[in-house]
Image: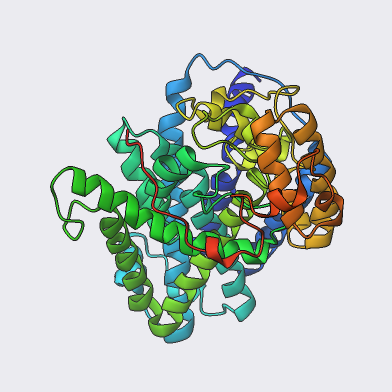
């Protein structure tokens, strides 16, 4: 019983890698129907888990915290293998290919005929394999990958994080997030901070374009300060994109054009998962650029299911107040930080329906303005209010002159002039 409790205490943050491991076993076994059932269960588990399991507002002590690093590395390997196994299955399905001669080698070693086990694969089985691979790539890119690439003092952690990110087409995250987003969050210079009244569908385009530009600006600035060219091997953005090109090449080798489309689809899935998180994590919150990040500048979430499948990054307020704190030590900040309207997946669903999102988030934004914002932040919030196009917000000027607010520095939600943010002045670890 004690061993089970310890396993759960340390392993509960890694439910996605555990499900990916089960999916990998089913893919190797050619158990197509079971794989379909697992894919359906996983998505149902994601979207109803917050409602089923409620909140966890406790803090925990881990005496053997070093264990989390090998668990994270193992999680990355499992998720990468799951994506590669999907590439093999797709190649076998569309072209009868045996990627890297894997099936032939396995048969020589064990006598097990993997090609025969997959001879009966249907389109439904391939779609289920895609679903579990997309979740695995998302986990490797923006969940475990996020945590590992924050450990900038640990080159092994950063490498494992970036390796996982390559399988979700997301190596830019390891640069843009710790060196850009964490310095610029809740200001107009951060493309990953959504504005009051900005729909998710506008935000995802603005954020995506802005982040690619920001990554290049960050690396160019860093290398210029070192007296080096941004077009050399020292550019981490270029190295990351080269890693992604290798993964794309593996998919093409497996299944030709269908393989490339599948890899792009995995990247699209991972991108939207991240951008939904970006959208809700700081929506409408403002900060004077010269002032430090505080716990009030991120929406926090203490739902158990979000905690389990996001490696506790849902405790986002503490993470942004001190990014050096590892995920297992993040605090719930029950009375100190603003909180999301529901768990992460519930908030994601709200965000996909803008009127519903505005209805849920607007009262929380006005409460933040009244109870948490400084006077300078309240003015910035008022500027966004009058430009938001959201009826619950538009008239909240907090006594400031409306015409002056309309001429203020805060961009409007449909302001495409903020599509590509100005080049930041980065702070490098």
Q: Is residue 318 visible?
A: yes
Between 147 and 109, which is closer to the camera in this rendering? Answer: 147
Q: Is residue 151 left or right of residue 276?
A: left
Colouring: rainbow
Query: Is 251 displayed left or right of 372 in the figure?
Result: left
- Along the viewing direction, whichever of 132 and 360 lies nearer the viewer: 360
Closer to us: 132 or 227: 227
Question: Which residue is most to the left?
Answer: 227
Residue 240 spot, x, y in % from top left? 31, 57
Query: Is residue 239 toward the left or the right of residue 388 in the image?
Result: left
Quarter of the picture containing the N terminus is top right
**Residue at point 40% right, 33% down?**
70
Q: Is residue 54 above or below residue 208?
A: above
Residue 45 visible somewhere in the drawing = no
Q: Quadrant of the C terminus?
A: top left
Q: Position of residue 171 (x, y in %)?
A: 38, 54
Residue situated in front as seen by the camera: 227 or 429: 227
Which residue does the image show at 80% across and 38% down from the upper left?
Answer: 398
Q: Position of residue 217 (x, y in %)?
A: 33, 54
Task: Answer above or below: position of 301 versus 101.
Answer: above
Q: Residue 351's image quarter?
A: bottom right
In the image, residue 61 above or below residue 33: above
Q: Which residue is painted at 42% across and 45% down in the image? A: 180
Quadrant hosting residue 270: bottom right
Q: Is residue 49 left or right of residue 168?
A: right
Question: How many numbered marks are there?
Answer: 0
Q: Position of residue 382 (x, y in %)?
A: 73, 44
């Amino acid at each position: 019983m004690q061993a089970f409790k310890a396993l759960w205490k340390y392993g509960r943050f890694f439910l996605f890698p555990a499900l990916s491991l089960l999916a990998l076993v089913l893919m190797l076994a050619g158990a197509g129907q079971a794989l379909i059932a697992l894919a359906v269960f996983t998505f149902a588990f994601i979207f109803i888990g917050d409602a089923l399991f409620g909140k966890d507002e406790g803090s925990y002590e881990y005496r053997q915290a070093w264990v989390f690093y090998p668990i994270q590395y193992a999680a990355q390997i499992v998720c990468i293998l799951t994506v590669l196994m999907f590439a093999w299955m797709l190649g076998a399905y569309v072209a009868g290919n045996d990627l890297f001669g894997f099936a032939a080698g396995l048969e020589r070693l064990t006598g097990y005929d993997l090609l025969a086990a997959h001879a009966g694969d249907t389109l439904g089985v391939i779609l289920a394999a895609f679903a579990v691979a997309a979740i695995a790539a998302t986990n490797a890119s923006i969940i475990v990958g996020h945590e590992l690439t924050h450990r900038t003092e640990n080159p092994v952690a950063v490498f494992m994080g970036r390796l996982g990110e390559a399988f979700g087409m997301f190596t830019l995250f390891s640069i843009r997030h710790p060196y850009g987003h964490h310095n610029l969050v809740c200001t107009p210079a951060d493309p990953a901070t959504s504005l009051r009244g900005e729909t998710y569908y506008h935000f995802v385009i603005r954020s995506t374009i802005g982040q690619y530009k920001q990554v290049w600006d960050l690396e160019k600035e860093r290398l210029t300060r070192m007296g080096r060219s941004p077009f050399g091997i020292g550019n981490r953005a270029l190295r990351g994109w080269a890693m992604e090109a290798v993964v794309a090449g593996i998919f093409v080798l497996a299944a030709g054009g269908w393989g490339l489309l599948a890899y792009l689809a995995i990247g699209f899935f991972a991108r939207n998962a991240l951008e939904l998180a970006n959208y809700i994590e700081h929506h409408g919150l403002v900060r004077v650029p010269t002032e430090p990040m505080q716990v009030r500048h991120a929406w926090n979430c203490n739902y158990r299911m979000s905690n389990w499948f996001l490696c506790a990054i849902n405790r986002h307020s503490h993470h942004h107040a001190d990014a050096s704190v590892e995920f297992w030590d993040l605090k719930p900040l029950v009375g100190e930080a603003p909180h999301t309207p529901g768990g992460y997946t519930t908030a994601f669903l709200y965000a996909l329906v803008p009127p519903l999102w505005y209805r849920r988030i607007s009262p929380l934004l006005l409460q933040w303005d009244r109870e948490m914002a400084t006077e300078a932040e309240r003015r910035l919030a008022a500027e966004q209010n009058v430009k938001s196009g959201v009826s619950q917000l538009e008239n909240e000027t907090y006594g400031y002159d409306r015409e002056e607010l309309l001429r203020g520095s805060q961009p409007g939600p449909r302001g495409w002039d903020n599509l590509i943010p100005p080049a930041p002045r980065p702070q490098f670890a």
